[in-house]
């Protein structure tokens, strides 16, 4: 094993001037957390699994003590000695039930608790609580991946994120000179740009992106495909994209092939709003995700496995080891995948592949061009009450919105829902809002909130 910092751009004033000291306290704390996560995820398997078992016992014991909902699920057994796999799967509706009836299971002090909500990309959005520790972990884990792969920390980073509240040109830009969290005084990184967009002025957006090298591009697959359409293939090299890190949805094979032709690596992160990072794509085996074992335990249910691309895939169940405010234990995240005990690259840890069901948010217009279509479930819930919904593009001019479980929709609600969809899709679409007793999902295990029936 070799551990050195010869390739890391350490600042001239990185080390402390104080007697009998090495680094500044804030740098020590952050680097320590990174090293801890690397040790857990790449070190001794036996030590890791023992640590996970202890964390799981702590979480289950906490849930049983703080929640009537969880006490009932666990039953009369001792909470600190429960056979993990004997617990029932946790559904979205059950999470909603627990949150609405009991609130957060962790007090506001000594840690801060915030309420979050999922986007609703796989059905009805759910609210949940998370602690400040969860936010801190997510930040540290995202940066840890750069250390795990030996990525160049001196490169710039650009994060593209959809947001309806963007500026008059359809996008806004926040700049900072650093993107490595509390390592600001220790390591010299590139600049950071956080760009929020909604129907952007593509000419101005391209000018902004080309104003300085992009470096690490963090963006959804749908956004990248639309950029390809508007900017062309050569743009990504011209703009200095060193790596594309897809987020939120899957990566199409077409996109992977395009970036391979440009010699730009693609490194996806598999995550969910409820639990944070689930896995990081292997740098040697594309499409295989090393589980973030410092954060989650992942199972794949084989009882209802189905064939997909020549492999058997099943429901992905995630246990978030740090979910004390709203416990996620054996949570059905809504995706399908295959699970292996280790990766072909040699990584000695659980690895997911054939991850199936991530939504692809693209619309096809009558003139053949594509546009991004991303509607958060919460936006619809702000306009009407219902149990579930589905949005379908049925042809190049028509979008159907199915509202399930609601008792009625007023003309004003119908108009508001239609207006919301058109604001995202464009005025060239007819929007039909249908109230149904229950949405017919057919035999699909994955219930996608949006699907295009005209995309090929």
Image (cartoon, grey):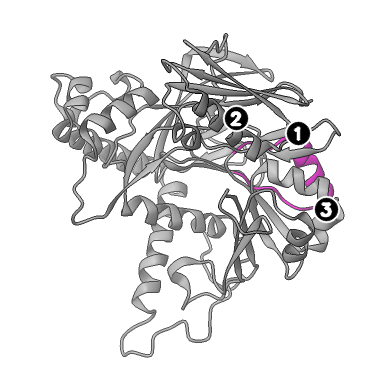
Q: Which mark is residue 231?
A: 3
Nearer-the-camera pick, 103 or 272: 103
**Is 360 placed left or right of 254 in the picture?**
left
**Residue sitting at 57 percent across and 9 percent down?**
443
- Measuring from the top left, give residue 388's x and y in whole percent: 47, 22
**Is 336 placed left or right of 71 in the picture?**
right
Q: Nearer the viewer, mark 3 or mark 1?
A: 1
Q: Does residue 432 show up?
A: yes
Q: Of callouts 3 and 2, which one flags the residue occurring earlier in the amino acid sequence?
A: 3
**Is 329 placed left or right of 210 in the picture?**
left
Position of 57 relative to 161 (above/below): above
Q: Residues within 10 Å of mark 1 (few under 14, many from 20)?
A: few
Q: Residues within 10 Å of mark 2 (few under 14, many from 20)?
A: many
Position of 401 relative to 99 (above/below): above
Disc 2 element: helix
- Measuring from the top left, give residue 250's x and y in whole percent: 63, 36
Position of 406 relative to 185 (above/below): above
**Residue sitting at 68 percent across and 17 percent down?**
310
Q: CA distance from mark 3 to mark 2?
A: 31 Å
Q: Of callouts 3 and 1, which one flags the residue occurring earlier in the amino acid sequence?
A: 3
Quadrant for the C terminus in the image: top right
Q: Of callouts 1 and 2, which one flags the residue occurring earlier in the amino acid sequence?
A: 2
- Measuring from the top left, give residue 5's x and y in whole percent: 54, 71
Q: CA distance from mark 1 to mark 2?
A: 12 Å
Read off the residue under disc 1.
428
**Residue sitting at 52 percent across and 74 percent down?**
187
- Measuring from the top left, give residue 416's x and y in whole percent: 54, 32
Nearer-the-camera pick, 87 or 395: 395
Residue 90 within the segment the image draws in magenta: no
Numbered range of the magenta stretch: 249-268
Position of 219 relative to 369 (above/below): below
Q: Which mark is residue 418?
A: 2
């Amino acid at each position: 094993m070799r551990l050195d910092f010869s390739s890391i751009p350490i600042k001239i004033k990185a080390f402390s001037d104080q007697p009998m000291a090495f680094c500044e306290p804030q740098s020590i704390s952050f680097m320590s957390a990174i090293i801890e996560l690397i040790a857990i995820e790449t070190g001794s398997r036996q030590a890791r699994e023992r640590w996970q078992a202890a964390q799981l016992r702590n979480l289950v014991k906490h849930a049983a003590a703080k929640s009537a909902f969880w006490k009932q699920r666990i039953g009369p057994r001792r909470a600190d000695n429960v056979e993990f796999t004997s617990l029932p799967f946790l559904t979205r509706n059950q999470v909603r039930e627990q949150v609405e009836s009991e609130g957060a299971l962790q007090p506001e002090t000594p840690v801060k608790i915030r309420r979050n909500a999922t986007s609703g990309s796989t059905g009805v959005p759910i609210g949940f609580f998370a602690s400040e520790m969860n936010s801190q972990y997510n930040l540290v884990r995202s940066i840890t991946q750069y250390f795990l792969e030996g990525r160049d920390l001196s490169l710039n980073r650009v994060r593209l994120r959809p947001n309806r509240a963007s500026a008059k040109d359809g996008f806004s830009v926040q700049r900072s000179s650093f993107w490595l969290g509390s390592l600001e005084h220790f390591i010299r990184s590139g600049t950071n740009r956080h760009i929020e967009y909604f129907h952007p002025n593509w000419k101005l957006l391209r000018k902004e992106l080309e104003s300085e090298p992009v470096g690490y591009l963090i963006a959804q697959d749908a956004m990248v495909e639309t950029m390809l359409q508007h900017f062309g293939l050569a743009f990504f090299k011209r703009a200095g994209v060193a790596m594309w890190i897809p987020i939120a949805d899957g990566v199409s094979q077409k996109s992977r092939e395009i970036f391979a032709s440009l010699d730009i690596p693609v490194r996806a992160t598999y995550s969910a709003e409820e639990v944070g990072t689930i896995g990081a794509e292997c740098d040697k085996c594309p499409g295989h995700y090393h589980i973030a074992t410092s954060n989650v335990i992942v199972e794949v249910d084989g009882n209802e496995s189905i064939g997909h691309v020549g492999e058997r895939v099943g429901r992905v169940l995630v246990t978030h080891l740090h979910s004390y405010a709203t416990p996620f234990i054996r949570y059905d995240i809504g995706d399908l995948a295959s699970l292996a005990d280790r990766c072909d690259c040699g990584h000695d840890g659980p690895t997911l592949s054939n991850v199936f069901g991530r939504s692809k948010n693209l619309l096809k217009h009558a003139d053949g061009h594509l546009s991004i279509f991303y509607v958060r479930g919460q936006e619809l819930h702000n306009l009407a009450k219902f149990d579930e919904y589905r949005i379908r593009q049925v042809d190049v001019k028509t979008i159907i919105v199915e509202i399930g479980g609601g008792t009625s929709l007023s003309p004003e609600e119908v108009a508001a829902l239609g207006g919301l969809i058109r604001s995202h899709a464009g005025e060239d679409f007819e929007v039909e809002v249908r109230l149904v007793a229950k949405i017919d999902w057919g035999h699909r295990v994955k219930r996608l909130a949006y699907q295009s029936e005209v995309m090929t």
